[in-house]
Image (spheres, rainbow, N blue to C red):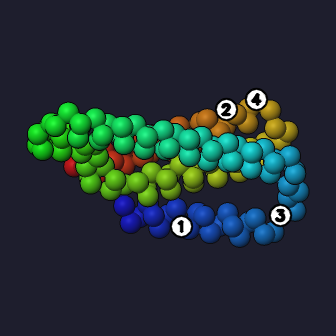
Amino acid sequence: MKKIITIATVCSVSFTANAHESDVVYNEEILQVAAAIFVVGMFMYFIIDIIRRIFEHRLKNKIVDKGISENIAQSILATQKPEDNRYTNVKWFAILASIGLGLTGVNYTQPIGFHSLAIMAFSISLSFLGYYLFTRNAGK
């Protein structure tokens, strides 16, 4: 695992060193589209989180109203185990790194078109595959 992190760090340093030397002109439309996607995604996440909290609150109120025993109520309300959240940071790193690599690939394959969506979908799917393989190997 340490070798992989070291190799990824060395590769990322070379990319950042290369980025300072090139004369890349960033299109303002790309920034606007990325910002719009980010804002819409955050808004959807916010709405979904609010709906989840409302339903959890309603469930807890129904459990209290029905007078269910403590053991059954605890088993119903215990939705996540602490082990489920162990690799959350790794998951988000993989997703955000793949989005960054996908956007870099899109930038080098101008003009933006249908192939840009394919590049982004492929890079994000590879990140989920990497995360799956990481969790499978870490569980052993």
Say which mark, if any, is on residue 60: none
Query: For the residue marked with disc 1, what is the amino acid?
Result: Thr
Q: Where is residue 126 in the image (x, y as percent from the top left)?
A: 52, 40
Q: Distance between the residues labelled 2 and 1?
A: 26 Å
Q: How far apart are marks 3 and 4 (CA)?
A: 26 Å
Q: What element carries label 3?
A: loop
Disc 4 designates what residue?
114
Q: Position of residue 2 (x, y in %)?
A: 38, 66
Say which mark, if any, is on residue 22: 3
79 relative to 66, above or below: below
Q: Which residue is depicted at the point 59% across and 36% down? A: 122
Query: For the residue marked with disc 2, what is the amino acid?
Result: Ala
Q: Where is residue 65 in the image (x, y as percent from the top left)?
A: 24, 36
Q: What element carries label 1?
A: helix
Q: Where is residue 72 in the image (x, y as percent from the top left)?
A: 14, 38
Q: Nearer the viewer, mark 3 or mark 2?
A: 2
Is the Cβ of the residue at disc 2 closer than 8 Å to that at disc 1?
no
Is the Cβ of the residue at disc 3 closer than 8 Å to that at disc 2?
no
Q: Which residue is depicted at the point 20% across and 33% down? A: 66
Q: Which of marks 2 and 1 is in front?
A: 2
User: In the rendered view, does 120 fall on the left or right side of 81?
Assistant: right
Is the Cβ of the residue at disc 2 closer than 8 Å to that at disc 4?
yes
Say which mark, if any, is on residue 118: 2
Q: Distance between the residues labelled 1 and 3?
A: 20 Å
Q: How far apart are marks 4 and 1 (CA)?
A: 31 Å
Q: How far apart are marks 3 and 2 (CA)?
A: 25 Å
Query: For the residue marked with disc 4, what is the amino acid?
Result: Phe
Q: Is mark 4 on a helix, strand or loop?
A: helix
- Looking at the image, which is closer to me, 12 or 86? 86
Say which mark, if any, is on residue 9: 1
Q: Which residue is depicted at the point 87% across and 51% down? A: 28
